[in-house]
Image (cartoon, rainbow, N blue to C red):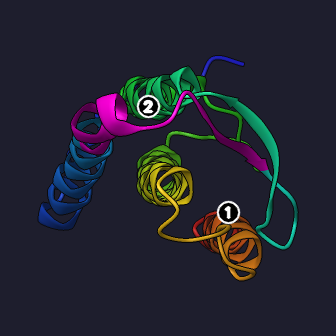
Amino acid sequence: MNNPHVKVKLTTAEWVVEAFAVLLVAITLSLVLQNYASLPPVIPSHFNASGTPDGYAGKWTLLLLVSISVAIYGLATLAVKFPMLMNYPIPITTENNERQYLNAVKMIRAIKLITCAMFLYLVYEVINNAKGVSTGLGMWFLPIALASMFGTIGYYLYRGYQLR
């Protein structure tokens, strides 16, 4: 489908979200760089649903976590530049395209922020687990991560239907 091209301008709140997401990625990278040399060669790399470590791998897996975080940030940033290429649950028309694009862009930014925060927490806890400071992610990590992600998506989908 050829959706109309419209440039979506960032609001002040969206600039704040972008800045905060960049800060989260920078802190994640900084944590790894500061702690990498002092970590044991094998660290927790997988956690079960209750947050207990149940898999171990080389400390290079922290570099993988940071790389994934940076990649998600970059791809989400690229995606918001082309909202006309996204899939929408309702037809996009010249009357609703600006509202729908803005809603979709806000959703992607919110998901990006949540994802960057989750990766920061994962890296922080993997480092703490490897150093023996803590054990596991905590039993609330998975429910909070899933609820925040699906709640955000649900909210913006509902909002998209309201903005028809």
What secondary structure is marked by label 1?
Answer: helix
Any magenta on residue 38?
A: yes
Image side of residue 86 versus residue 55, left or right: left
Quadrant assignment, res 31 = top left
> Who comes first in sequence, dot 2 or dot 1?
2
Q: Which residue is mark 1?
A: 153
Image side of residue 144 versus residue 118, left or right: right
Q: Nearer the viewer, mark 2 or mark 1?
A: 2
**Residue situated furthest left in the rendering:** 12
Q: Quadrant of the C terminus?
A: bottom right
Q: Residue at x 64, y 68 (%)?
A: 137
Tell which of 113 and 48 is nearer to you.
Answer: 48
Quadrant assignment, res 51 = bottom right
Residue 98 placed where, x, y %?
41, 48
Residue 67 in sight from this viewpoint? yes
Q: Residue at x 75, y 69 (%)?
A: 142
Q: Residue at x 29, y 36 (%)?
A: 29
Q: Quadrant of the N terminus?
A: top right
Tell which of 124 and 105 is nearer to you.
Answer: 124
Q: Amino acid at mark 1?
A: Ile
Tell which of 40 and 139 is nearer to you.
Answer: 40
Residue 90 placed where, x, y %?
76, 50
Bounds of the magenta span? 31-46
> Where residue 66 is drawn, which disc sits there?
2
Residue 89 in sight from this viewpoint? no
Q: Residue at x 59, y 40 (%)?
A: 93
